Amino acid sequence: MDTPQPLYSAATVRELDRLAIAALKIPSITLMKRAGRAAFAQLLQRWPEVKRIQVFCGGGNNGGDGYVIAALAAQKQIPVTVYACVDPAELKGDALEACEYARREGVHIVTSLTELDSADGNTVVVDALLGTGFSGELREPVGHAVDRINKGSGPVLAVDIPSGVSADSGSASHAVQADITVTFIGRKLGLFCGRGVAHCGDVVFESLGAPEQIYTEVEPLVQRYDAASVKRLPPRAADSYKNQFGHVLIVGGDSGYGGAALMAAQSAARAGAGLISLATRPEHLAAALTRSPEVMVHPVISGQELEPLLEGPDVIAVGPGLGRAPWGEQLLARAGRAETPLVLDADALNILAGGRVLAGIKRNDWVLTPHVGEAARLLDCDTEEVLADPRAAAIAVQQKFSGVVILKGAGTLIAHEQGVDLINSGNPGMASGGMGDLLTGIIAALIGQHLSPLEAARLAVWLHGEAGNRAAEDGQRGLLATDMLPWIRRLVD
């Protein structure tokens, strides 16, 4: 199993820059030129037939990287124009030296967008406007430049991070839409979570020769897990039997929502649970047995009827199709006090947020799986606050309720007692009903197969997203949650 990738804040990356310059004993301009060369090499690799390059430069080190790229393009005799958002006369330090380098190579520098031709399909646009120090709102003329970049038809390479994206949180209200982002020294969290995922395109990391020891001297914000770093289930022994692999109880499916609970049960089965029980409304009994005869379906009309079903399972998942009516509240109240690991999703989280059921309870053995809206309700804030800093929101939910918290999104964050993890897995086709129900069932099945709640959360998030990717090979639009069930089975081993 490989180690996860560390993701850093803007301040930490600046410290890594300083440590790299000190360790390599080189001037900072040398590191800037390395960054420019690395980005330019990626540009040529991605678009080897490029006919023209436009570089949008700001006034800081990110702009300096852009001037280096422009100089290198001129050396290759590729027509290149720089649009300078900050008058070159106002530049200082390394950015000024890089600008002078570009001028010596004959690069044409303009300071007015009216003098810049629109980028067409043969023109590669380089975004070197703002770096990791950006926060807040874009100011002019940078905002105008960002609009110009986004309206052009040419592909876009962002230097270090797309301008307008927060390196620390991934928040972005007005930002460059890049096709590829070449990032340096340390991977920034904002490229992998929040809106940053939608703006950065493909992310390419370049260490610029920074020595490995500098990374031991700083703390990352997040650890990023992938297929190689999540803990997998061990092979089964030849004499295995079903009771070794967990009895999962799914609780949910109020009137009109029976499918959600059944999909959670099906995904638990496909993820390898030995036994699956489903406590649901009586009217769903026939449909559930017809669809999944492997599932033991129990009709319940009250929390009291649920009580005897809580004694046998190794893990209980509550929430899919639960509803917020008294029926759902009763079931959550009973299940939430069972001395059994829990997975809470959907309306179980909304009921929990209401404060009348399980008020004040904190558990180390439960997994909460909110999306952004549910996280906002759990924190009694609006969704914009969660989107502005998803990592902080995930931490806040975990501190309020303990256990493991999975804040779902394009970059899913997993907050736990030891820190925060991130997993990028899945695709936009998974923005459809039932996907969260599958994840709930997978987590429960993995806990039943003796993974810890945290290990189960990591593997389940990766497995769920990868199953979505495989299923989307036939097309993202129209992807259904149940299309993923066969892939869950194939991937879980």
Image (cartoon, grey):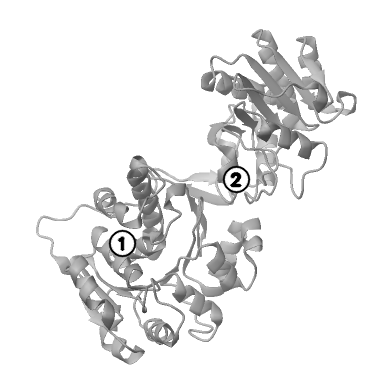
Going by the picture, which residue comes out furthest to the bottom? 304
Q: In this rendering, is residue 156 above or below 475?
A: above
- The quadrant where residue 192 appears: top right
Depth check, front residue: 134 or 374 = 374
Which residue is at 33% across, 61% downward? Answer: 442
Circle 1 — which element? helix
Horizontal placement of 262 versus 76: left or right? left
Depth check, front residue: 176 or 368 = 176
Q: Residue 54, percent across and down?
A: 70, 22
Residue 164 visible here = yes
Q: Which mark is residue 446?
A: 1
**Mark 1 residue type:** Leu
Q: In this rendering, is residue 105 above or below 277?
A: above
Residue placed under numbered mark 2 in the picture: 196
Depth check, front residue: 438 or 62 = 438
Circle 2 — which element? helix
